[in-house]
Amino acid sequence: MSITMYQSDRQFVTPANDASLYSALGGDTSGVLRRGNHLNITVSGLQVTVDTGQAIVLGRLVEVTEPVTFTLPASATGNVVIGIDLSKANTVMGQAGQANYQVKVNQVYLAGITGDLVQEDINNGGYIYQLPIATFTSQATTATVSQNNPMLNDSGWLNMDTARTGARLWGNPSYAQYRVRDNVVFLRWRGVDVTNSVNGNQVGYVPASIRPDVDITAAGTNIDSSGNQAVTAVINEGAVLWINYSDNHRTNVHGMLSYPI
């Protein structure tokens, strides 16, 4: 058939079907749950131990049932990750339906990696997804680890599309970012010059999937040589954040706003 329904009588539901459902219900986000010892990380030399806990990685429930120890690469920087690799095959022992049946899951791992994270859409044809739970810096024989467990239903801070508007970020720190947490969109921006952007007032775009259904307005500020000036920030139905300024004060705008989706 060209159409099916997995939650129906006598239907067969694969792990991929199940994960796709749970991932969608979680907003296609991943995070560590408040279970066990929250995957607490300790370090001894280059040896890292991840304690017990659970995480959901794009709809897949991963559990560390006993502490896991592995070695970080020396003289490097990178991330400690929970990795999923669906290209690997699990090992089956015994006979299905019998007491001796066991599955060794080879498709999930803990590791310290360098370089860019691989985060493919494993619910839509991808194979590999690496969820960072900490960063590390190592020397020849020692390492320091900073744990930062991501939260479920939280996208983390992502960059707005400022290239599309032509806005300029300057200063340190400077940013134009958005975040989706528990179906609320948060926007923050700092050190943005919109003088030469589209219409001379546009900051950046958010994805169309999280644009508001009505214009949302908030107070902001511009800071330049003449001091602080109030500006109005608007995120509109077209998914663009723009600034309503006065007297050409638009070279260093700051602010934040939020709205439900």
Image (cartoon, rainbow, N blue to C red):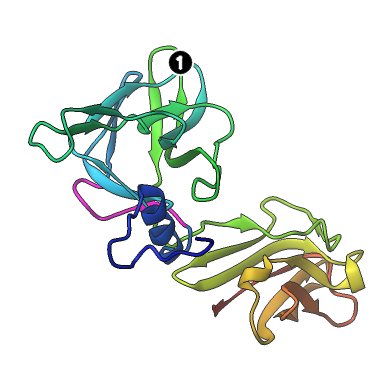
Left or right, residue 12 beside residue 218: left
Amino acid type of disc 1?
A: Ala
Number of callouts in the render? Answer: 1
* Residue for badge 1: 74
Against 83, residue 15 (above or below) is below
Q: What element carries label 1?
A: loop
Foreground: 250 or 215?
Answer: 215
Please, which residue is most extreme toward the left here? 99
Against 142, residue 149 (above or below) is below
- Residue 165, picture quadrant: bottom right
Q: Is residue 30 magenta?
A: yes
Residue positioned 28% across, 67% down in the render: 9
Residue positioned 55% across, 36% down in the render: 117
Against 220, residue 204 (above or below) is above
Residue positioned 65% across, 82% down in the render: 218
Against 22, residue 137 (above or below) is above
Left or right, residue 82 beside residue 105: right
- Quadrant of the image for the C terminus? bottom right
Q: Position of residue 171 (x, y in %)?
A: 74, 52
Mark 1, residues whose alpha carbon is within 10 Å: few (<14), some, or many (≥20)?
some
* Residue range corresponding to the magenta coloring: 29-38
Q: Position of residue 106 (x, y in %)?
A: 33, 29
Foreground: 183 or 78?
Answer: 183
Foreground: 37 or 226?
Answer: 37
Residue positioned 78% across, 75% down in the render: 242
- Residue 134, picture quadrant: top left
Please, which residue is most extreme toward the bottom here? 214
